[in-house]
Amino acid sequence: MMRNVRKNKDLGIYGLAAQWYDRNSRKSRLAEMKGYADEVAKHVTEGAHILEVAPGPGYLSIELAKRGFHVTAVDISPDFVEIAQRNAKCFCKLYGRKCISLAFGKSPF
């Protein structure tokens, strides 16, 4: 029987695990995310509104925002939202919510 079953059964990464992931994946993931952002830019209208779900530390959201896209990112983990906000400075809008409860009203998504 599994001993480490998550109580809330969500897939969020929290606390020290989120900090560890940001610290230890940054170098390798930044180059990868730049490539993904280049690929998105080929297929999406310049200045488009983009919603990223589960951005983690925000690497892709940041790269997309640097290319002039209007990025909104949503993550279930408040720890990753805080880390992404710190990484992004003021590039993106970041929200900490479960995606099932998103309500953006007249949003462009």
Image: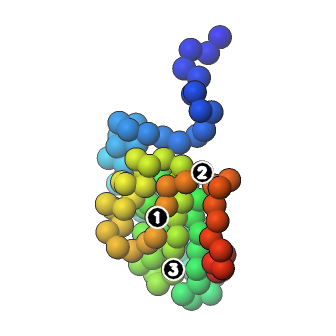
Q: Residues within 10 Å of mark 1 (few under 14, many from 20)?
A: many
Q: Amino acid at mark 2?
A: Lys
Q: Residue 40, relative to residue 9: is it above or below? A: below
Q: Are marks 2 and 1 in contact (CB under 8 Å)?
A: no
Left of 43 or right of it: where is 32?
left
Q: Amino acid at mark 1?
A: Leu
Q: Residues within 10 Å of mark 2 (few under 14, many from 20)?
A: some
Question: Of helix, strand and loop, which one carries label 1?
Answer: strand
Task: Quickly name the residue at label 1.
Answer: 94
Question: Of helix, strand and loop, which one carries label 2?
Answer: loop
Q: Position of residue 24 (x, y in %)?
A: 35, 44
Q: Position of residue 59 (x, y in %)?
A: 43, 61
Q: Position of residue 47 (x, y in %)?
A: 54, 87
Q: Position of residue 14 (x, y in %)?
A: 44, 39
Task: Quickly name the residue at label 2.
Answer: 98
List the single residue furthest toward the bottom. Answer: 46
